[in-house]
Image (spheres, rainbow, N blue to C red):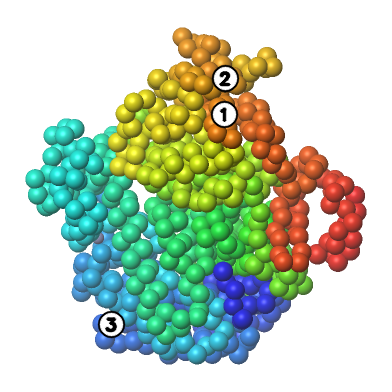
């Protein structure tokens, strides 16, 4: 948490790049920041080239000025280490820093987030810079957080990475025999005789399928993903340790990207003092999906987080960069706070003059003054947040439902060849999240090794990979009265992507009380139908498990095709609890029918008793329960009765029906 003696309100501000502007402008920036109630700036994100113009020279003169200037102006600093883009001289002199792409092509200097994570040059100089920054600025008491690098991600397939991969594998598996066993290399004669036979799964090795997404050898690809996430994490840790030497008390973060596929954020979060993330929904992103991503970011540490970036209005890199409608940024910000943020920060404060971000929204537009709609909206929100003081800081979200999210599953499921290319991990998770969202039932996004006993319901959609220890943990949860909801494509493989023999859903079979014999894949234009006990029907598709009950009770059965009459959803009593198994992808109403039963059985309650079109979320501090009430529909909504007679923190008045 950004729980520091230096922070007494919701920090409000964002990325500020004064080094890209003449100094005369800085004064105007300060005037405008005050008008907008901005109190934090993220500095120094892309300044490596300026700070280290050659191998032996460091030049902090401009940064010194900036640091002094923002301090004099009462601003707090989220201090970046600048290592998200290496200087051109470094690429010229030390080509090992340049990544090799998936196509095997060695990159030249360019873009950003461009360094090979296993490059000795990158590691040496990024750490040196981080240490120098920490040593030089350690006494600035307005630094509220270290922001290491920027939006880590990407992959590298260079020789250094290949060598490091072999070392990583050696450490993990000990012997080649074991490696051959877990990767099941007898398939397609892949047996490795020497560690050097192991090559990275890029386009040259053709371990990728025709679609470039699914792979031939899931074991290799999966381990490469894990290795790559670990390699980049090592870079982060090295910089973190370097700044901690000088400033042990300043929290360290790096800005994450929600459901970004490349890095195992649960693992990363263990190394971070506070999670921060960048929220860039598109014009068509569902509010439920944004809410889920916030909950995931909160779930990484099960603590409040920082919103490091959002645009005040427009984007530049999306397909259609529509404006945020009047009030939309404000609503999005409140939703962010509702789901656990303690800061609201923008990218960026002043709109760029050149480069690809010149059309990216900013607090200060190209016109350069306060007379814009966007500025007025930013200032209004700034004033509101200022009035809240520290009330909401550190307050917790509450949930009786835990929804499992797991990067290993994300990778493995989407790498797997078959049964359907339309099976997308995040979409599947979101379908379940959305049900609870619409009912205003709080959800925690949890890792596979969470303490399940905290929850009445644990939802594990497409729990394709069941890692060691999980079977027991889930069984204990259900035996002790918990309700587990799982679905098709669950319990199929172990942690190396080899199938559990003896029938699907493998380790979940006993607690689910079903045996899945076959899995049918339906094309988008194909549908089946399922009939419930009350006679109602619901469309279903994508995948249809052909399953047999082994003690479970059918909740719905297929209506069509040669498997008509077979169960499409079931429930099984196991110990004191119940396992629901949903064998196909139901359309929304059908899914709700099943989940309603689970919710009733578990006695899980909504935040408020009324049904409403509003989003209502609570956070709780030691003394106060806060309700965040948001209207994301196009219609006016009535304030539910149960929310009347409370103090409205924005207007200061009592709420009325
Ligand atoms: C990312 C980066 C920023 C900026 C924004 C633009 O989040 O971290 O530097 O490029 O995207 O949306
Ligand atoms: Zn590399």
Residue bearing the label numbered 3:
54
Whether tag 2 and tag 1 are in contact, CB under 8 A, the answer is no
Residue of label 1:
573
Q: Does the residue labelled 3 lie within 8 Å of ligand 2?
A: no
Q: In this view, does 493 lie above or below 75?
A: above
The total of numbered circles placed on residues is 3
Q: Which quadrant of the structure image shows residue 538?
A: top right
Task: Tell me what residue is drawn at x 57 percent, y 84 percent.
Answer: 142
Relative image position of residue 318 (x, y in whole percent):
51, 51
Q: Which of marks 2 and 1 is in front?
A: 1
Q: Residue at x 49, y 19 (%)?
A: 549
Q: What secondary structure is found at the residue carrying circle 3?
A: loop
Q: Which residue lies furthest to the top in this view?
A: 562
Element assignment for label 2: strand
Q: Mark 2 points at which residue?
A: 554
Which is closer to the viewer, label 3 or label 1?
1
Q: Using a 10 Å C-alpha cutoff, classify the residue at mark 3 as few (fewer than 14 neighbours), some (14 to 19) or many (20 or more).
A: some
Sequence-wise, which precedes: disc 3 or disc 1? 3
Sequence-wise first label, 2 or 3:
3
Question: Disc 2 or 1, which lies upstream in sequence?
Answer: 2
Q: How crowded is mark 2: few (under 14 residues within 10 Å), some or many (20 or more)?
A: many
Q: Is mark 1 on a helix, strand or loop?
A: strand
The residue positioned 32% from the left and 29% from the top of the image is 501
For disc 1, the neighbor class at 10 Å (few under 14, some 14 to 19, many from 20) is: some
Say if 535 sits above or below 210 in the image.
Answer: above
Residue placed furthest toward the left: 193
How far from the left and from the top, in percent, is residue 362?
59, 66
- Residue 108: name its quadrant: bottom left
Residue sitting at 53 percent across and 64 percent down?
276
């Amino acid at each position: 948490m950004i729980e520091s003696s230096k922070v007494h309100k919701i920090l409000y501000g964002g990325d500020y790049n004064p080094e890209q502007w003449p100094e005369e402008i800085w004064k105007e920036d300060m005037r405008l920041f005050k008008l907008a109630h901005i109190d934090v700036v993220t500095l120094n994100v892309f300044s490596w080239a300026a700070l280290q113009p050659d191998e032996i020279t460091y030049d902090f003169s401009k940064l010194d000025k900036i640091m002094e200037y923002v301090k004099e102006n009462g601003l707090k600093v989220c201090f970046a280490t600048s290592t998200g883009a290496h200087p051109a001289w470094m690429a010229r002199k030390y080509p090992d820093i340049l990544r090799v792409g998936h196509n095997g092509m060695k990159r030249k200097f360019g873009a950003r987030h461009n360094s090979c994570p296993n490059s000795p040059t990158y590691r040496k100089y990024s750490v040196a810079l981080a240490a120098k920054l920490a040593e030089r600025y350690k006494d600035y008491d307005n630094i509220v957080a270290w922001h290491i690098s920027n939006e880590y991600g990407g992959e590298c397939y260079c020789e250094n990475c290949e060598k490091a991969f072999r070392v990583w594998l050696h450490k993990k598996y000990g012997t080649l025999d074991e490696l051959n066993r877990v990767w099941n290399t007898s398939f397609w004669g892949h047996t490795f005789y020497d560690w050097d036979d192991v090559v990275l799964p890029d386009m040259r090795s053709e371990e990728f399928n025709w679609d470039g997404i699914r792979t031939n050898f899931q074991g290799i690809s999966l381990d490469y993903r894990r290795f790559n996430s670990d390699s980049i994490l090592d870079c982060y840790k090295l910089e973190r340790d370097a700044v901690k030497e000088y400033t042990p008390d300043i929290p360290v973060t790096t800005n994450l990207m929600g459901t970004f596929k490349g890095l195992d954020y649960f693992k990363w979060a263990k190394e971070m003092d506070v999670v921060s993330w960048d929220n860039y929904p598109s014009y068509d992103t569902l509010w439920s999906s944004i809410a889920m991503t916030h909950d995931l970011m909160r779930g990484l540490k099960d603590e409040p987080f920082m919103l490091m970036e959002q645009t005040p209005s427009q984007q530049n890199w999306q397909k259609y960069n529509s404006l945020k409608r009047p009030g939309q940024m404000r609503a999005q910000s409140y939703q962010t706070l509702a789901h656990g943020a303690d800061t609201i920060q923008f990218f960026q404060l002043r709109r760029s003059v050149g480069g690809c971000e010149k059309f990216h929204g900013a607090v200060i537009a190209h016109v350069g003054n306060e007379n814009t709609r966007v500025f007025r909206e930013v200032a209004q929100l700034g004033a509101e947040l200022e009035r809240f003081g520290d009330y909401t800081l550190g307050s917790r979200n509450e949930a009786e439902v835990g929804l499992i999210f797991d990067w290993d599953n994300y990778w493995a499921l989407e790498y797997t060849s078959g049964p359907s290319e339309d099976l997308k991990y995040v979409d599947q998770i979101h379908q379940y999240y959305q049900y609870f969202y619409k009912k205003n039932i709080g959800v925690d996004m949890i890792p596979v090794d969470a303490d399940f006993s905290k929850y009445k319901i644990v939802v594990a959609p497409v729990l394709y990979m069941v890692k060691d220890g999980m079977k027991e943990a889930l069984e204990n949860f259900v035996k002790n009265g918990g309700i587990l909801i799982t679905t098709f494509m669950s319990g199929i493989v172990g942690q190396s992507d080899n199938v559990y023999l003896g029938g699907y859903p493998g380790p979940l079979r006993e607690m689910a009380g079903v045996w899945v014999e076959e899995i049918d894949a339906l094309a988008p234009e194909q549908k089946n139908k399922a009939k419930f006990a009350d006679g109602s029907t619901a469309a279903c598709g994508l995948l249809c498990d052909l399953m047999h009950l082994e003690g479970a009770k059918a909740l719905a059965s297929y209506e069509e095709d040669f498997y008509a009459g077979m169960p499409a959803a079931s429930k099984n009593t196991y110990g004191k609890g119940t396992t629901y198994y949903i064998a196909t992808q139901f359309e929304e109403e059908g899914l709700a029918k099943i989940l309603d039963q689970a919710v009733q059985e578990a006695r899980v309650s909504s935040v408020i008793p009324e049904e409403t079109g509003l989003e209502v979320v609570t956070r709780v501090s030691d003394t106060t329960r806060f309700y965040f009430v948001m209207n994301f529909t196009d219609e006016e909504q009535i304030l539910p009765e149960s929310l009347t007679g409370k103090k409205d923190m924005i207007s200061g008045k009592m709420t009325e029906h």
